[in-house]
Amino acid sequence: MIEILKARLKLGKQTIAYPDGPARFPERFRGRPVLDPALCEQGCIACADVCPTGAVREPGLTSMALDMGRCLFCAECGEACPSGALSFTRDYRLAMRTREELLVVAARGDEAKLARTLDARMRSLFGRSLKLRQVSAGGCNGCEAELNASGNIQFDLSRFGIQFVASPRHADGIVVTGPVTENMLLALQKTYQATPAPKIVVAIGACAIAGGPFAGTPVVNDGIEGALPGVPVDLWIPGCPPHPITILDGLLRMLGRVAGDELRLAGTGIVGEAEPLAGPIAPAGHDAPAKSA
Ligand code: SF4
């Protein structure tokens, strides 16, 4: 027993400081895209041509847009661009409250948006305790693995009262991953119906948002909007898959547990600085494991 205690003490605290301290990411982490159509070369649509999901729209000298809901963050577009008009920052705060807000449009003075908080009633119901039922609706296990990681000792969603439950009847909402295959459609619909109102609906990953690379194929429903038409989605978390801190950040912003740009350093009242959000585009490949903050 003593030996176990010594080993545990030696390990120290493994949980990241976020949101009371800086969030740290692997070197190759890719976050919010930035677009500068002024750098585009006349007639060049290399970024749109190379995009596997049609996420880049209207590349041109005057306008340009990238749909984060479709984006796989593969960085092929940035590598194909000869003039650096499209690049990725390290801004992990990608979750939005509406589907439209996932569209990054290049416009001078266009500020990056952050997910808004639920209304006062929903916040009073779920702000300090949120039980979710996860439905993997044909996912590749990428988003599911990151969602699983968000509950591990490093990211520890449960310290904010957010937990996953086995039954939709015990849940305050559902979390959907995957493009919603035909095989999973009925299961998702029944899970949604079995969850008592008022309920939260969260879509995680490019597949659940818009079908991802499977969009348009006959055996998928192109994500949650095709599978549950007319059902309001409270939070859209893009990525392929999103990092656990992107998931955590989106949920906490929706619940009103994190606001604004600044980071509070625990117990000091000091405002800390996040890692620089601007960074060079990373080559395609696998990320190294995240370091704890
Ligand atoms: S990162 Fe990949 S999926 Fe996203 S816009 Fe660029 S090419 Fe398309």
Image: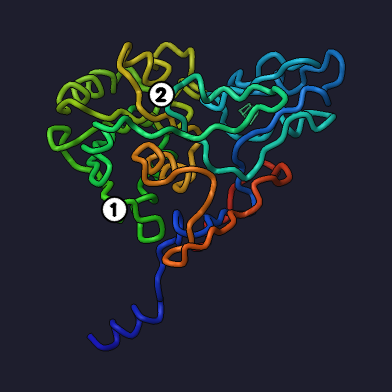
Mark number displayed over residue 90: none
Q: Is residue 99 above or below residue 88?
A: above
Query: In this orientation, which residue lies closer to the viewer: 186 or 47?
Result: 47
Judged from the image, the secondary structure of the residue bearing numbered disc 1 is helix
Distance in Å between CA atoms under marks 2 and 1? 27 Å
Judged from the image, the secondary structure of the residue bearing numbered disc 2 is loop
Q: Locate residue 188 relative to residue 267 in the image: left or right.
A: left
Could you classify mark 1 by the number of other residues whose Cα lies within 10 Å: few (under 14), some (14-19), or many (20 or more)? some
Judged from the image, the quadrant occupied by ligand 1 is top right
Query: In this orientation, which residue lies closer to the viewer: 207 or 195?
Result: 195
From the viewer's perspective, is the residue at label 2 or at label 1 nearer? 1
User: What residue is rendered at 77% in x and 15% in y?
Assistant: 62
Amino acid on which disc 2 is placed: Pro
Q: Is residue 163 above or below residue 136?
A: below
* Place of residue 162 in the rendered image (x, y in percent of width and height, measured from the top left): 28, 46
Dividing the picture into quadrants, the one containing residue 156 is bottom left
Q: Is residue 64 above or below residue 25?
A: above
Whether residue 52 is visible? no
Q: Residue furthest bottom?
A: 2
> Which of the image's four quarters has the N terminus?
bottom left
Beta carbon at label 2 within 8 Å of ligand 1: no
Whether residue 95 is visible? yes
Q: Which residue is mark 2?
A: 179
Q: Which residue is mark 1?
A: 158
Could you classify mark 2 by the number of other residues whose Cα lies within 10 Å: few (under 14), some (14-19), or many (20 or more)? many
User: What residue is rendered at 77% in x and 17% in y?
Assistant: 45
Q: Is residue 30 above or below residue 8?
A: above
**Upstream in the sequence, badge 2 or badge 1?**
1
* Place of residue 111 in the rendered image (x, y in percent of width and height, measured from the top left): 62, 31
The image shows a total of numbered marks equal to: 2
